[in-house]
Image: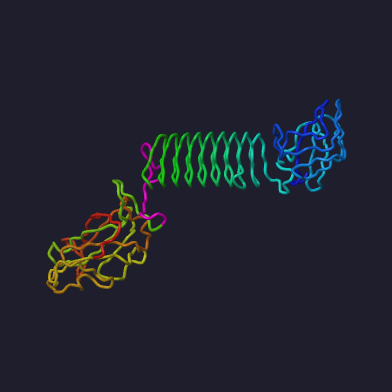
Amino acid sequence: MSKNLAIIAIALGLARAATAQSSFPIRNGVLQTPLDAAGFSISNLNLADSGIPTPTNQVITIDGQVFVITNTPASAGDVLVFDPATTTACFVAQATGLTESQVRVIDPLMTNSENVVLGAGASGSYKGCSMGFNANGSDGPYGQSIGQLARGGNQGVAIGGEASGYSQGVGIGESTIGYNHGTAVGQRSKGWVYGAALGCYAYAPNYAVALGTYSWSTNNAVALGSYVTNPIPSTTRVRGNLYLDGGTKIYTRPDFNSGEFTELATGGGAAGTFPVFHLDVGTVDGNWTDFEIKASTNNFASLCYYYKSWTNVQDATRGDTNALVYFTDDHAEDVRVWNLKPQTNAVSEMLISSNSVTQWIYFYPSHDCTIPWGDWMSSTNTALVWSWVRVDDLGFEMNVSGTKQRWNPIRPDSWEIERTTP
């Protein structure tokens, strides 16, 4: 039986009397009592007072369309099948109830009968499904309404008594509201205008998310946990402590869907990813001007970072091509000015006088490292250690015996979100 075959089931009882113009309590595939003027009638139908009617070649008019009955019923309980393509109707045996194809029928005059309506007062639309007393899927196509007074039209889904899930929304549960791309799951939950509410009485309109019984949020806010309320737009509120199972870091960025993420510090606020070093190069005897610094994550069994301030030729496997070195010159015109060392020159080459002393240097490693900085350069990397040594034009600072370089351990003074660029 094709999808265009519309079916109206008329149970014919024995000893049923009728007049020349008899009415059946069916309209557009839905049982109705009593039949109103817009229903259909059976014309010129002769019914025996004490037997099964024999209406072969009789006529049934349904909303102006005339159908000719082509046979007689064989037994009580037969159903009358209407075919709009041929404008005929015939009785068929129906001993075990309606077939699936027959149940799908809504309106015998619809040439594309892909709508399903079951229940008194139910209504639907193109490719929709309405099941239940006064279920309403007529607001638009593809609506799915299941339950008493459910409303799921216009690509929406409503499952449950008085559930609403229209306009591409989803409402599952008694008296849920999930319209306009919203989702509501749970008794009387509400999640409209792209909101998502999950839990009994959860409330999440306007792009909000509420997860938990009686959770409440609005305007891009998120509420996680039963009875959690979050009225602050674009924020997240969680009930109880937060445990990261398998994670050690939290990252943030100020602009939604734009820009780079930065690590969140343990104590709150955004953690910087640029370490800052305050190097004492000149307080020993005033002769030192440059330095070398190295980093390791296994206490110098191997290196992850290697920088030399006096040359632009950095280590090929652990180097940094964009580090910043700032210094002052006590013989400069303005001795307060932060001077940036060029990548190609040593600090000593930038001093005004051979008597100039640079006491302190601020050093900022970059993210332009041979070994990707994100793999190791972090304030929370407890295995990360640094060491440095002073250098001048004659070489490295050495120990008293002159046999070893004098390296010193050092830790970053701070971690910054951005490097200083005066």
Q: x, y (%) of residue 178?
A: 51, 42
Q: Quadrant of the C terminus?
A: bottom left
Foreground pick, 179 / 65: 65
Image position, residue 269 (x, y; %): 30, 49
Residue 12 shows up from this direction: yes
- 335 vs 4, left or right, is left
Which sits in the foreground, 155 or 89?
Answer: 89
Q: Is residue 31 above or below residue 322?
A: above
Quadrant the N terminus occupies: top right
Camera sees residue 245: no
Q: Residue at x 35, y 64 (%)?
A: 368
Name above or below for residue 306 compared with residue 190.
Answer: below
The part of the image, by quadrant, that contains residue 359 is bottom left
Q: How many marks?
A: 0
In the figure, is residue 11 to the left or right of 398? right
| Percent of width and height locating residue 407 | 22, 59
Check if residue 252 falls in the magenta segment: yes
Q: Which residues are magenta?
A: 234-257
Locate residue 42, reporting x and y percent: 80, 37
Left or right: 292 in relation to 103? left
Q: Is residue 6 above or below residue 363?
A: above
Task: Tell which of 305 and 402 is nearer to you.
Answer: 305
Q: Main secondary structure of the magenta part?
A: loop
The answer to whether residue 217 is magenta is no
Residue at the spot 41% in from the left edge and 39% down from the top edge: 216
Tell me what residue is drawn at x 23 percent, y 68 percent: 340
The answer to whether 314 appears left or right of 141 in the picture is left
Q: Nearer the viewer, residue 289 or 16?
A: 16
